[in-house]
């Protein structure tokens, strides 16, 4: 997988974050029937905390079929980059992995971003997606809020109020779409199955998290 990408010395030991980005994007855009990674190179800017991911290449918009997905492919790619940026803030140099999202994340996040408003009704793994969507929309408009954020049948369902821009609605669509490919427990790449949960391989095999 990593052979398709350029990491740079400053990313030594952090390849996991970039591999996650590639995996999520490749799965999210698999409906095009083409390999996105073959078209571009993932490079990292020389920042340790947070880590910024940029994509060289392009999304084949001619292959975009809105009968399969209503999420704009370019916005999906950007959403993944922004999610990974939030996720990278919890990277442990000592343990060489992303640390879990604290269970108390929502209260300080809601103070910083009042648009979060409603208490989330989903597992911690999707918190980075919600933060990425919130901060991205806030770049264009701020007089809005989530009116509902919940998990349903292994998918993230978001409702908003007072959004005014089509681009903002597209960001919300992309957040829901990306969540289908992200483990709802830990935020790593995940898949859905017949149990109506979106999980990574370790959490699908592990049962103890269900009791947390």
Image (cartoon, rainbow, N blue to C red):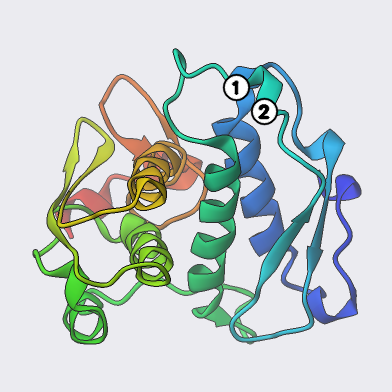
Going 74% across and 22% down the picture, which residue do you hit? 34
Q: Judge from the rendering whether residue 19 lies leftward or rightward of residue 141; answer left or right.
A: right
Which quarter of the figure has residue 121?
A: bottom left
The picture places residue 105, in percent across and down from the top left corner, at 25, 78
Q: Judge from the rendering whether residue 40 lies leftward or rightward of residue 54; answer left or right.
A: right
Quadrant assignment for the N terminus? top right
Q: Secondary structure at mark 2?
A: helix
**Distance CA(mark 1)–CA(mark 2):** 5 Å
Camera-side residue of 125 and 142: 142
The picture places residue 68, in percent across and down from the top left corner, at 46, 16
Q: How many marks?
A: 2
Quadrant assignment for the C terminus? bottom left
The circle drawn on residue 28 is none
The picture places residue 102, in percent across and down from the top left corner, at 30, 77
Going 63% across and 52% down the picture, which residue do you hit? 21
Camera-side residue of 207 and 24: 24
Q: Judge from the rendering whether residue 162 lies leftward or rightward of residue 50; answer left or right.
A: left
Camera-side residue of 190 and 167: 167
In the displayed structure, 203 sits above or below 124; it is above
Q: Are marks 1 and 2 in contact (CB under 8 Å)?
A: yes
The picture places residue 155, in percent across and down from the top left corner, at 28, 36
In the displayed structure, 77 sits above or below 126; it is above
On the image, numbered disc 2 is attached to which residue?
Answer: 61
Q: Residues within 10 Å of mark 1 (few under 14, many from 20)?
A: some
Q: Residues within 10 Å of mark 2 (few under 14, many from 20)?
A: few
On the image, numbered disc 1 is attached to which residue?
Answer: 64
């Amino acid at each position: 997988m990593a052979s398709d990408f350029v990491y740079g010395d400053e990313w030594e030991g952090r390849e996991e974050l970039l591999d996650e980005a590639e995996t999520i994007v490749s799965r999210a855009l698999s409906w095009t029937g083409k390999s996105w990674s073959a078209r571009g190179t993932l490079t990292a800017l020389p920042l340790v905390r947070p880590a910024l991911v940029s994509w060289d290449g392009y999304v084949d918009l001619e292959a975009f079929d809105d009968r399969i997905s209503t999420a704009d492919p370019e916005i999906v790619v950007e959403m993944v980059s922004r999610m990974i940026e939030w996720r990278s803030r919890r990277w442990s140099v000592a343990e060489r992995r992303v640390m879990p999202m604290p269970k108390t994340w929502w209260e300080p996040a809601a103070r910083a971003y009042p648009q979060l408003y409603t208490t989330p009704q989903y597992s911690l793994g999707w918190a980075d997606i919600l933060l990425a969507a919130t901060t991205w929309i806030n770049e264009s408009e701020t007089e809005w809020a989530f009116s509902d954020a919940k998990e349903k049948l292994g998918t993230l369902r978001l409702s908003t109020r007072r959004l005014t821009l089509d681009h903002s609605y597209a960001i919300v669509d992309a957040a829901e779409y990306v969540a289908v490919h992200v483990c709802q427990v830990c935020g790593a790449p995940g898949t859905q199955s017949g149990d109506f949960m979106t999980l990574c391989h370790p959490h699908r095999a592990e049962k103890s998290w269900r009791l947390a």
